[in-house]
Amino acid sequence: MTHRICKAGRIGLVAAFAALGMGMAAIVAQAAGYPDKPIEMTVLFGSGSGADLTARILADGMSKRLKVAVPVVNRTGGGGAVGYSYVKDRPADGYTIVWNSDSVATAYHRGNMPFNYTAFTSIARVSLEVPALAVRSDSPWHTLKDLMQAAKKSPNTIKVGISGIGSFTHLASAALFATGGAEIRYIPYGEGQATVELLGGRIDAALQWPSVFKSNVDAGTLRILCVTSAGRIELLPKVPTAKEQGYDVDYVIWRGIAGPKGMPSQVVATLEKAIRETVESPEFKDAGVKLGFTPAYLPSHAFGELVARTDHEDAEIMQRLELSKQ
């Protein structure tokens, strides 16, 4: 009886491996004619958001170069976990991709999903976005140093608006103020609300994307104290970096394209080429100026290394903020 059970087990195991091999063989065979049908791009944020608009411009450029439709589907929730979970479980054939960011790290370390970046194939980095720190124009703080000194003088009293606990703007704020030894009260808001609250005087400062502040800066109601990148940005060329003001921080968000783990190299190469040509196009560069992002292509291998470094860096900051559950 034992012998018969073991034999049946071996047969089942062989069958399972055979099925797996057939599945992989089918994907490899499909890669030869890739793509021959629409490629669905999952976006983790709501329609009309900055990330969504950039993704749609990218999808349009990819579609023109790949000669197939690249429809965008918004799958929101869980700080990206809903969209990542969907894409992770799709076939690794190149017909399901995700517009990803460091949210793949924050969603994992916050405990929103049980898998991390290793569940995906990093295809290409597309862009960089740089947060900016703003105060009202009638604020007594005219430089980052002014705000830092005030925060150190009265710990945990200055209120800084962020997009949400554990969000990129939260981590960037924490990295920025840590360099000055300042303790801040972080006030989380939904998308776009921090600027409204800042103008209304209910918070003292806000760290958000520059495009959110631009119209109010032009109108003279807000003043931007710094950006958190190593160099100045094209949208706000007169705004100094934190580094220029003596605070050693370089904290920017990357966005790129990933797919399920195990994608054929031929498929990755095809997507890389379409993404690179789109990112380097004049149309995409013009969109970056308008929307406040910097085109910044990286190929698959280099992008994968960046994703791994980001996971480590974000984990350290989240542990310091007592946000990590992994």
Image: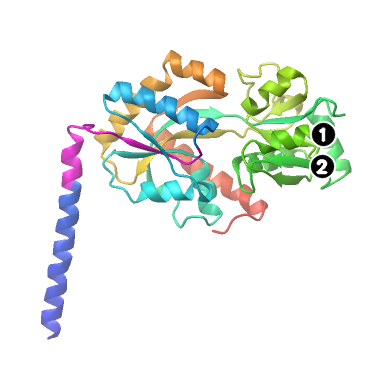
Task: Indicate the secondary structure of the residue bearing disc 2.
Answer: loop
Tell me which segment is drawn in magenta.
Answer: 25-46
Between 112 and 307, the one lying in front of the other is 112
The residue depicted at 73 percent of the width and 25 percent of the height is 224
Q: Disc 2 residue type?
A: Ile
Between 149 and 291, the one lying in front of the other is 291
305 sits left or right of 130 in the view: left
Tell me the quarter of the image containing the N terminus: bottom left
Q: Disc 1 residue type?
A: Leu
For label 2, count other residues whose C-alpha is less than 10 Å away and answer few (under 14), some (14-19) or many (20+). some
**Image x and y of residue 120, in percent:** 38, 45
Which residue position holds label 2? 158
Which residue position holds label 1? 147
Between 204 and 191, the one lying in front of the other is 191
The residue depicted at 32 percent of the width and 21 percent of the height is 64
The residue depicted at 15 percent of the width and 77 percent of the height is 6
Task: Indicate the secondary structure of the residue bearing disc 1.
Answer: helix
Classify 212 as above or below 113.
Answer: above
**Image x and y of residue 63, in percent:** 32, 25
- Whether residue 79 appears in magenta in the rendering, the answer is no
Residue lying farthest to the top in this orientation: 282
**Image x and y of residue 70, in percent:** 33, 31
- Quarter-of-image position of residue 186: top right
272 sits left or right of 171 in the view: left
Classify 171 as above or below 210.
Answer: below
133 sits left or right of 74 in the view: right
**Image x and y of residue 190, in percent:** 63, 42
144 sits left or right of 296 in the view: right
